[in-house]
Image (tube, helix red, strand yellow):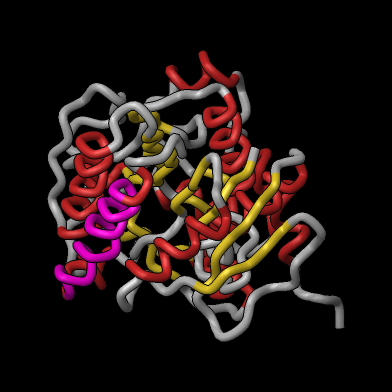
Amino acid sequence: MKILILGGTGLVGSHLVSEAVRSGHAVAATFHDASPPPSPEGRDWFPLDIDSGAEDGLDSLLQKTQPEAVINATGWTWVDGCEKDPARADRLNHLFPKRLAQCLEPTRTRLVHFSSSYVFDGLAGPYSEDTPPGPINVYGHSKRAGETALLDGLPDRSLILRTIVVYGAELRKKNFVYQVLDKLRRGRPLEIPADQEGNPTEASDLARATLALLSANCAGIWNVAGPEASMNRLEFATLIAQTAGLPDSLLIPRTTAALAQPARRPLRGGLLTDKLCRQVGPLMRPAREALSKLIPRLEPPAV
Protein backbone atom coordinates (compact mmCIF):
# COMPACT_ATOMS: atom_id res chain seq x y z
CA MET A 1 0.00 0.00 0.00
CA LYS A 2 1.19 3.55 -0.71
CA ILE A 3 1.04 5.36 2.63
CA LEU A 4 1.74 9.03 3.37
CA ILE A 5 2.55 9.65 7.05
CA LEU A 6 2.16 13.26 8.18
CA GLY A 7 4.38 14.04 11.16
CA GLY A 8 6.87 11.29 10.46
CA THR A 9 9.53 12.48 12.93
CA GLY A 10 7.31 12.62 16.04
CA LEU A 11 6.83 9.89 18.63
CA VAL A 12 3.88 8.19 16.92
CA GLY A 13 4.87 9.10 13.37
CA SER A 14 8.42 7.77 13.59
CA HIS A 15 7.20 4.39 14.81
CA LEU A 16 4.58 4.32 12.06
CA VAL A 17 7.24 5.01 9.44
CA SER A 18 9.49 2.24 10.73
CA GLU A 19 6.68 -0.30 11.05
CA ALA A 20 5.18 0.52 7.64
CA VAL A 21 8.55 0.16 5.90
CA ARG A 22 9.20 -3.09 7.76
CA SER A 23 5.79 -4.37 6.65
CA GLY A 24 6.56 -3.76 2.99
CA HIS A 25 4.45 -0.66 2.36
CA ALA A 26 5.63 2.14 0.06
CA VAL A 27 6.08 4.99 2.52
CA ALA A 28 6.38 8.75 2.19
CA ALA A 29 6.53 10.95 5.29
CA THR A 30 6.70 14.61 6.28
CA PHE A 31 8.95 16.58 8.60
CA HIS A 32 8.89 20.19 9.76
CA ASP A 33 12.47 20.71 10.97
CA ALA A 34 15.30 22.27 9.00
CA SER A 35 16.39 19.04 7.36
CA PRO A 36 14.82 15.59 6.84
CA PRO A 37 15.97 12.45 8.65
CA PRO A 38 18.07 9.89 6.77
CA SER A 39 15.97 8.22 4.08
CA PRO A 40 16.20 4.44 3.86
CA GLU A 41 15.32 2.81 0.57
CA GLY A 42 11.61 3.02 -0.18
CA ARG A 43 11.02 6.06 2.02
CA ASP A 44 10.70 9.67 0.83
CA TRP A 45 10.64 12.73 3.07
CA PHE A 46 8.82 15.99 2.36
CA PRO A 47 8.69 19.26 4.33
CA LEU A 48 5.28 20.27 5.69
CA ASP A 49 4.64 22.84 8.42
CA ILE A 50 0.98 22.63 9.36
CA ASP A 51 1.34 25.57 11.75
CA SER A 52 2.01 28.21 9.11
CA GLY A 53 -0.50 27.87 6.29
CA ALA A 54 -0.14 24.31 5.02
CA GLU A 55 -2.96 24.41 2.47
CA ASP A 56 -0.85 24.92 -0.65
CA GLY A 57 1.85 22.56 0.51
CA LEU A 58 -0.70 19.92 1.39
CA ASP A 59 -2.38 19.99 -2.02
CA SER A 60 0.97 19.73 -3.76
CA LEU A 61 2.14 16.90 -1.49
CA LEU A 62 -0.98 14.83 -2.13
CA GLN A 63 -0.64 15.33 -5.86
CA LYS A 64 3.03 14.35 -5.75
CA THR A 65 2.67 11.23 -3.60
CA GLN A 66 -0.75 9.93 -4.74
CA PRO A 67 -1.22 7.85 -1.54
CA GLU A 68 -3.79 5.13 -1.04
CA ALA A 69 -3.87 6.06 2.66
CA VAL A 70 -2.83 9.12 4.65
CA ILE A 71 -1.98 8.74 8.33
CA ASN A 72 -2.16 12.03 10.20
CA ALA A 73 0.24 11.83 13.14
CA THR A 74 0.44 15.62 13.49
CA GLY A 75 -1.26 17.79 16.08
CA TRP A 76 -0.59 19.80 19.23
CA THR A 77 -0.56 17.55 22.28
CA TRP A 78 0.74 19.99 24.93
CA VAL A 79 -2.38 20.13 27.08
CA ASP A 80 -1.46 23.22 29.08
CA GLY A 81 -0.20 24.97 25.96
CA CYS A 82 -3.57 24.39 24.29
CA GLU A 83 -5.30 25.93 27.31
CA LYS A 84 -3.24 29.09 26.91
CA ASP A 85 -3.63 29.31 23.11
CA PRO A 86 -7.06 27.96 22.07
CA ALA A 87 -6.75 29.36 18.55
CA ARG A 88 -3.60 27.37 17.83
CA ALA A 89 -5.14 24.24 19.38
CA ASP A 90 -8.15 24.61 17.09
CA ARG A 91 -5.97 25.25 14.05
CA LEU A 92 -3.77 22.18 14.54
CA ASN A 93 -6.17 19.68 16.11
CA HIS A 94 -9.41 20.60 14.32
CA LEU A 95 -9.01 22.78 11.24
CA PHE A 96 -6.02 20.93 9.77
CA PRO A 97 -7.73 17.49 9.91
CA LYS A 98 -10.85 19.13 8.46
CA ARG A 99 -8.80 20.59 5.60
CA LEU A 100 -7.16 17.20 5.05
CA ALA A 101 -10.55 15.51 4.75
CA GLN A 102 -11.65 18.15 2.25
CA CYS A 103 -8.58 17.49 0.12
CA LEU A 104 -9.19 13.74 0.16
CA GLU A 105 -12.95 13.86 -0.41
CA PRO A 106 -12.73 13.78 -4.26
CA THR A 107 -10.28 10.84 -4.14
CA ARG A 108 -10.51 7.24 -2.95
CA THR A 109 -7.74 7.78 -0.38
CA ARG A 110 -8.36 6.63 3.18
CA LEU A 111 -7.48 8.74 6.21
CA VAL A 112 -6.19 7.65 9.62
CA HIS A 113 -6.27 10.24 12.39
CA PHE A 114 -5.20 10.08 16.05
CA SER A 115 -7.46 11.39 18.78
CA SER A 116 -7.32 11.20 22.55
CA SER A 117 -9.01 9.95 25.70
CA TYR A 118 -9.18 13.65 26.62
CA VAL A 119 -12.43 13.85 24.67
CA PHE A 120 -13.94 12.46 27.91
CA ASP A 121 -14.45 14.14 31.28
CA GLY A 122 -12.72 11.39 33.28
CA LEU A 123 -15.52 11.01 35.82
CA ALA A 124 -16.58 7.47 34.95
CA GLY A 125 -13.87 5.84 32.87
CA PRO A 126 -12.60 3.63 31.43
CA TYR A 127 -14.59 4.42 28.29
CA SER A 128 -15.76 2.48 25.25
CA GLU A 129 -16.02 3.87 21.74
CA ASP A 130 -19.78 4.32 22.22
CA THR A 131 -19.56 6.56 25.29
CA PRO A 132 -20.72 10.13 24.52
CA PRO A 133 -17.73 12.51 24.73
CA GLY A 134 -17.57 15.37 27.21
CA PRO A 135 -14.21 17.18 27.12
CA ILE A 136 -13.24 19.45 30.02
CA ASN A 137 -10.29 21.37 28.57
CA VAL A 138 -9.28 23.14 25.36
CA TYR A 139 -7.16 20.23 24.13
CA GLY A 140 -10.05 17.79 24.53
CA HIS A 141 -12.48 20.14 22.79
CA SER A 142 -10.09 20.61 19.86
CA LYS A 143 -9.56 16.87 19.47
CA ARG A 144 -13.29 16.20 19.60
CA ALA A 145 -13.86 18.90 16.96
CA GLY A 146 -11.29 17.15 14.76
CA GLU A 147 -13.11 13.85 15.18
CA THR A 148 -16.43 15.42 14.26
CA ALA A 149 -14.97 17.09 11.18
CA LEU A 150 -13.75 13.75 9.84
CA LEU A 151 -16.94 11.86 10.70
CA ASP A 152 -18.92 14.55 8.86
CA GLY A 153 -16.54 15.13 5.94
CA LEU A 154 -15.15 11.67 5.19
CA PRO A 155 -17.36 9.23 7.11
CA ASP A 156 -16.70 6.01 5.18
CA ARG A 157 -12.94 6.46 4.79
CA SER A 158 -11.88 7.93 8.13
CA LEU A 159 -10.27 5.72 10.78
CA ILE A 160 -10.12 7.66 14.06
CA LEU A 161 -7.91 6.15 16.76
CA ARG A 162 -8.25 7.32 20.35
CA THR A 163 -5.18 6.66 22.45
CA ILE A 164 -3.58 7.70 25.75
CA VAL A 165 -0.22 7.91 27.60
CA VAL A 166 1.89 7.04 24.55
CA TYR A 167 5.55 6.34 25.28
CA GLY A 168 8.56 4.88 23.51
CA ALA A 169 11.89 5.63 21.89
CA GLU A 170 11.73 9.19 20.57
CA LEU A 171 14.16 11.55 18.86
CA ARG A 172 13.12 14.53 21.00
CA LYS A 173 12.99 12.48 24.23
CA LYS A 174 9.89 14.26 25.55
CA ASN A 175 7.48 11.52 26.62
CA PHE A 176 6.76 10.39 30.18
CA VAL A 177 9.33 7.58 30.25
CA TYR A 178 12.16 9.96 29.38
CA GLN A 179 10.94 12.47 31.97
CA VAL A 180 10.98 9.88 34.75
CA LEU A 181 14.35 8.42 33.74
CA ASP A 182 15.97 11.85 33.44
CA LYS A 183 14.88 13.00 36.89
CA LEU A 184 15.75 9.77 38.68
CA ARG A 185 19.13 9.34 36.99
CA ARG A 186 20.04 12.83 38.22
CA GLY A 187 18.80 12.00 41.71
CA ARG A 188 16.04 14.56 41.64
CA PRO A 189 12.52 14.10 43.00
CA LEU A 190 9.60 14.07 40.61
CA GLU A 191 6.01 14.91 41.52
CA ILE A 192 3.54 12.48 39.97
CA PRO A 193 -0.26 12.86 39.76
CA ALA A 194 -1.31 9.67 41.54
CA ASP A 195 -5.02 10.16 40.82
CA GLN A 196 -4.83 10.16 37.01
CA GLU A 197 -5.64 6.77 35.47
CA GLY A 198 -5.20 5.51 31.93
CA ASN A 199 -3.60 2.91 29.67
CA PRO A 200 0.17 3.22 29.11
CA THR A 201 0.54 2.68 25.34
CA GLU A 202 3.86 1.73 23.76
CA ALA A 203 4.38 3.54 20.45
CA SER A 204 5.51 0.58 18.35
CA ASP A 205 2.46 -1.40 19.54
CA LEU A 206 0.28 1.54 18.57
CA ALA A 207 1.90 1.59 15.11
CA ARG A 208 1.35 -2.13 14.55
CA ALA A 209 -2.29 -1.92 15.62
CA THR A 210 -2.83 1.13 13.39
CA LEU A 211 -1.52 -0.64 10.31
CA ALA A 212 -3.52 -3.78 11.14
CA LEU A 213 -6.76 -1.78 11.32
CA LEU A 214 -5.87 0.08 8.13
CA SER A 215 -5.11 -3.16 6.29
CA ALA A 216 -8.46 -4.58 7.47
CA ASN A 217 -10.30 -1.59 5.92
CA CYS A 218 -11.67 -0.51 9.29
CA ALA A 219 -13.34 2.89 9.70
CA GLY A 220 -14.96 4.94 12.45
CA ILE A 221 -13.74 5.38 16.02
CA TRP A 222 -11.50 2.80 17.69
CA ASN A 223 -9.76 2.79 21.06
CA VAL A 224 -6.11 1.80 20.55
CA ALA A 225 -4.25 1.65 23.86
CA GLY A 226 -2.43 -0.67 26.22
CA PRO A 227 -4.41 -3.26 28.20
CA GLU A 228 -4.20 -1.57 31.64
CA ALA A 229 -7.04 0.94 31.52
CA SER A 230 -6.94 1.82 35.23
CA MET A 231 -3.19 2.10 35.84
CA ASN A 232 -2.43 5.41 37.53
CA ARG A 233 0.58 7.56 36.67
CA LEU A 234 2.37 6.78 39.94
CA GLU A 235 2.08 3.04 39.28
CA PHE A 236 3.43 3.56 35.78
CA ALA A 237 6.30 5.75 36.99
CA THR A 238 7.16 3.15 39.63
CA LEU A 239 7.31 0.45 36.95
CA ILE A 240 9.65 2.65 34.91
CA ALA A 241 11.94 3.18 37.90
CA GLN A 242 11.99 -0.48 38.90
CA THR A 243 12.67 -1.64 35.34
CA ALA A 244 15.58 0.78 35.08
CA GLY A 245 16.94 -0.13 38.52
CA LEU A 246 16.39 3.41 39.82
CA PRO A 247 15.03 4.49 43.24
CA ASP A 248 11.27 4.89 43.19
CA SER A 249 11.51 6.69 46.54
CA LEU A 250 12.15 9.89 44.56
CA LEU A 251 8.67 9.69 43.04
CA ILE A 252 6.43 12.01 45.04
CA PRO A 253 2.68 11.30 44.80
CA ARG A 254 0.46 14.33 44.41
CA THR A 255 -3.17 14.93 43.62
CA THR A 256 -3.88 16.58 40.29
CA ALA A 257 -5.50 19.49 42.14
CA ALA A 258 -2.32 20.07 44.16
CA LEU A 259 -0.24 20.38 40.97
CA ALA A 260 -2.39 23.39 39.92
CA GLN A 261 -1.91 22.87 36.18
CA PRO A 262 -3.57 25.38 33.82
CA ALA A 263 -5.75 22.75 32.13
CA ARG A 264 -8.14 20.42 33.94
CA ARG A 265 -7.33 16.72 33.56
CA PRO A 266 -9.77 13.82 33.16
CA LEU A 267 -8.83 11.64 36.12
CA ARG A 268 -10.38 8.29 35.19
CA GLY A 269 -9.62 8.58 31.50
CA GLY A 270 -8.77 5.01 30.53
CA LEU A 271 -9.97 3.38 27.32
CA LEU A 272 -11.64 -0.01 26.93
CA THR A 273 -10.07 -2.00 24.09
CA ASP A 274 -12.38 -5.01 23.67
CA LYS A 275 -13.27 -3.98 20.12
CA LEU A 276 -9.60 -3.69 19.17
CA CYS A 277 -8.71 -7.07 20.67
CA ARG A 278 -11.50 -8.78 18.76
CA GLN A 279 -10.18 -7.31 15.52
CA VAL A 280 -6.39 -7.61 15.81
CA GLY A 281 -5.75 -9.88 18.82
CA PRO A 282 -3.34 -9.15 21.69
CA LEU A 283 -0.99 -6.72 19.93
CA MET A 284 -0.86 -4.24 22.81
CA ARG A 285 1.57 -5.30 25.53
CA PRO A 286 1.22 -4.65 29.28
CA ALA A 287 3.47 -1.85 30.50
CA ARG A 288 5.86 -4.12 32.42
CA GLU A 289 6.52 -6.28 29.36
CA ALA A 290 6.95 -3.36 26.99
CA LEU A 291 9.21 -1.43 29.39
CA SER A 292 11.47 -4.47 29.87
CA LYS A 293 12.26 -4.32 26.13
CA LEU A 294 12.33 -0.54 25.80
CA ILE A 295 14.35 0.75 28.74
CA PRO A 296 17.61 -1.13 28.00
CA ARG A 297 17.59 0.65 24.63
CA LEU A 298 17.29 4.01 26.40
CA GLU A 299 20.07 3.48 28.93
CA PRO A 300 22.87 6.06 28.80
CA PRO A 301 26.21 4.80 27.40
CA ALA A 302 28.56 3.26 29.93
CA VAL A 303 31.34 5.59 31.11
Residue drawn at the location 21% of the way across and 51% of the way down: 140
Residue drawn at the location 58% of the way across and 78% of the way down: 187
Residue 294 as seen in the image, left or right of residue 207: right
- Residue in front for this viewpoint, 232 or 3: 3
Quadrant for the N terminus, please.
Answer: top right
Residue extending farthest to the right is 303
What segment is highlighted magenta in the picture? 85-102
Residue 58 figure quarter:
bottom left
118 w.r.t. 285: above or below: below
Residue drawn at the location 40% of the way across and 34% of the way down: 159
Residue 131 figure quarter:
top left
Residue 242 as seen in the image, left or right of residue 257: right
Residue 131 seen in this snapshot: yes
Instruction: Give coordinates of residue 211: x percent, y percent.
Output: 59, 35
Residue drawn at the location 46% of the way across and 54% of the way down: 73
Q: Is residue 67 magenta?
A: no
- Residue in front for this viewpoint, 209 or 239: 209
Instruction: Give coordinates of residue 102: x percent, y percent.
Output: 28, 48
Q: Is residue 93 magenta?
A: yes
Identify the main secondary structure in magenta. helix
260 w.r.t. 62: above or below: below
Quadrant for the C terminus, please.
Answer: bottom right
Residue 90 figure quarter:
bottom left
- Residue in front for this viewpoint, 16 or 104: 104
Instruction: Give coordinates of residue 101: x percent, y percent.
Output: 32, 46
Instruction: Give coordinates of residue 60: x percent, y percent.
Output: 46, 65
- The image shows a total of numbered marks equal to 0
- Residue in front for this viewpoint, 93 or 98: 98
Residue 242 seen in this snapshot: no
Residue extending farthest to the top is 278
Residue 300 as seen in the image, left or right of residue 141: right
